[in-house]
Amino acid sequence: MTASAALPRRRIGLAQIGLLVAVLAAVALIVLPGNADRAKSPAQTGPLGPAEAWPGVTIGQFPGNVSDGPAFSPSYFLDAQTAIGTAPSPDGAFMRLVRRAGDGTLRELRRLPYSGAPQFGGFATDGTELAWAESLAGDDNVTRTEMWAMRLPDGEPRRLTADTGDVVFFNSEYDMLIAERSLYWAEVAPGDEPATLIRSVPLAGGDVTTGTEDGAWAMTKFPWLVSAESGQASLPKLRDWRNNRELTVAAGGTELVTCGSVWCRVLVISADGPARTDLMRPDGSDRRRMAGGAAMSAVTDVALLDRFEVLTEAGPDTIPTSSQILYVYDIEKQQTVRVADAVGMIQSRNGVLWWSTGADTDIVWHTLPLTAIG
């Protein structure tokens, strides 16, 4: 059976996207050499440590609470030190969207009343503008989504549009994209036949434009789409919607394939469960073994920066069962690095990987700038 990205074809709220990570990235991993059938085996015999693998690359950390008290949840990093995320107001009446600098300084960007179950998500940047989606339930209990943006570094937030349609997010780096001075996102098309609407609005302001693609699709690196059917027997596909090109990704009957525009993650299934995970190009070339069956991919997107896979396995019995061991696999070097133990939440955006350790009031956030790895 094959599937592309294992993405569910239904609308999800911004608050639900974290619940999909385990489903979207259900891939068994951790590199150990051995027979890999048609895949090449990496030469490495065991994971390296960060200092050995990445001399000169600093893993940062900051406390889990903001300066005025409440817990901070990072959603996006503009760089390794500057986080965009959420924190309740000290009185608990509002959810704030804030920018947190490396020295802990806060700038409040937006605040929405807690009574409306506010949600912020879909962050995207082109280095000049930052854009996001925010949703809020009104007095009629209907949740409405708007697209917002601000000019970096210190511009005032401005609403781009409330004409967003039935927005669908998959907890991906590419849920929203800035390209050609416009903000893009995907919408589930109405009707009985599967279709996806690719919507955009100019960053300078203006009307929303919409293009229709038959079938269920998710956005990946612009202008590519990846097929997003769930539970289908069809082979995964990639579509360049701007240039009307389409590629079907070949896979065997015992392989589950998840693709981005540059690499595909291939889970090989045996009678006993996951056997190994390979990587290959979408056209089937350059296939190599990445892992055995000990753990899972930690993030939705395949091959961050077209180079890194983020992996986890369950920690030993001596640490809480909710904790994980965090690895990064370097596709270019065919090398696995054991980054951290006793890890909780894991996420990556804009070339920065971050994770939490600790619990409750003792949470600490850690950051790894993947863009700094040579």
Image (tube, rainbow, N blue to C red):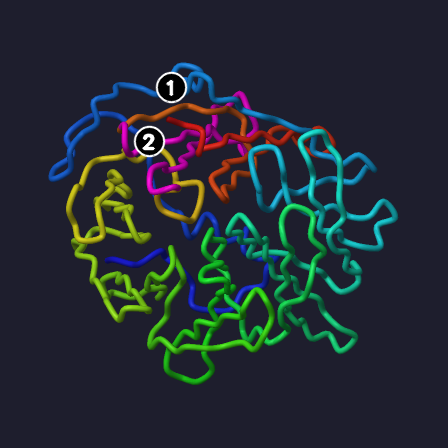
Q: List the residue tagged with mark 2.
A: 330
Cα distance between the residues tagged 2 and 1? 10 Å
Percent of width and height locating residue 256: 27, 52
Q: Which residues are magenta?
A: 305-333
Instruction: Name which quarter of the figure residue 336 lies in.
Output: top left
Q: Residue furthest left?
A: 38
Residue flagged by tag 2: what amino acid is it?
Asp
Left or right, 109 with respect to 277, comes to: right
Quadrant position of residue 134: bottom right
Q: Is residue 305 left or right of residue 18?
A: left
- Tell me the crowding category of disc 1: few under 14, some 14 to 19, or many 20 or more residues within 10 angstroms, Cα based: some
Q: Residue at x 52, y 38 (%)?
A: 346
- Give the quarter of the figure containing the N terminus: bottom left
Residue at position x 40%, y 63% from top?
Answer: 218
Measuring from the top left, give residue 137's x and y in whole percent.
72, 69
- The correct choice, above or below, for 278 with respect to 227 in the image is above
Q: Is 334 above or below relative to 160? A: above
* First in sequence: mark 2 vs mark 1: 1
Which amino acid lies under the numbered mark 1 shown in the image of this protein?
A: Ala
Tell me the residue that label 1 is attached to. 53
329 sits to left or right of 205: left
Q: Residue 189: image x %, image y %? A: 45, 78
**Secondary structure beneath label 2:** strand
Badge 2 crowding class, 10 Å Cα cut-off, few under 14, some 14 to 19, many 20 or more, is some
Query: Which of the pair 14/372 is nearer the observer?
Result: 372
Question: Is residue 46 within the magenta segment?
Answer: no
Task: Check disc 1 and report its element: helix, strand or loop.
Answer: helix
Q: Which one is in front, 328 or 253?
A: 328
Residues under numbered marks 2 and 1 in contact, where contact means CB atoms less than 8 Å apart: yes
Return the residue found at the far bottom.
Answer: 191
